[in-house]
């Protein structure tokens, strides 16, 4: 069973480059349906930024999944 975090990574790999939250959400919804609500995807993406890159210090995402870099508000890339 794919987690939300894994689906987000999959979306970034499939789409490539810098992506907005909306682009990632649309890809995830298209592939997996409404399995996760918008707020869940948004929270996961924010929590996937490592603390040393400005990520959330209270994130519960495992360190191996902290693979995003926030470039701008709601714009991310794989680091």
Image: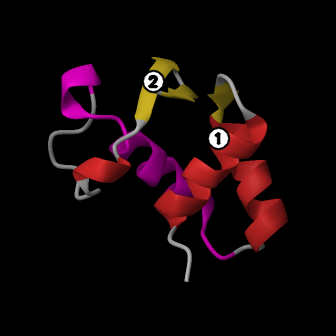
Q: Is residue 30 left or right of residue 66?
A: right
46 is higher (above) or lower (below) than 9: above
Q: Give the percent coordinates (x, y) of residue 21.
A: 63, 37
Extreme-right residue of the structure: 30
Q: Residue at x 50, y 71 (%)?
A: 3
Q: Main secondary structure of the magenta part?
A: helix
Extreme-left residue of the structure: 57
Asked if the stretch drawn in magenta spans residue 18, the answer is: no
The quadrant of the picture occupied by the C terminus is top left
Q: Residue at x 60, y 66 (%)?
A: 37
The circle drawn on residue 70 is 2
Q: Residue at x 34, y 43 (%)?
A: 66
Q: Give the percent coordinates (x, y) of residue 47.
A: 34, 46
Q: Quadrant of residue 34?
A: bottom right
12 is higher (above) or lower (below) than 43: above
Extreme-bottom residue of the structure: 1
SS for callout 1:
helix
Give the magenta part as a residue range.
35-54
Q: Disc 1 and disc 2: Cα gap in Å? A: 13 Å
Q: Is residue 55 left or right of residue 18?
A: left
- What is the image's colouring? secondary structure
Q: Quadrant of residue 70?
A: top left
Q: Which residue is mark 1?
A: 12
């Amino acid at each position: 069973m794919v987690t939300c975090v894994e689906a987000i990574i999959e979306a970034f790999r499939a789409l490539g480059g810098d992506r907005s939250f909306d682009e990632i959400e649309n890809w995830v919804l298209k592939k997996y349906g409404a399995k996760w609500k918008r707020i869940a995807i948004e929270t996961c993406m924010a929590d996937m930024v490592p603390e040393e890159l400005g990520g959330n210090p209270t994130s519960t995402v495992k360190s191996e999944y902290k693979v995003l870099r926030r470039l701008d508000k709601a714009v991310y890339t794989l680091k």
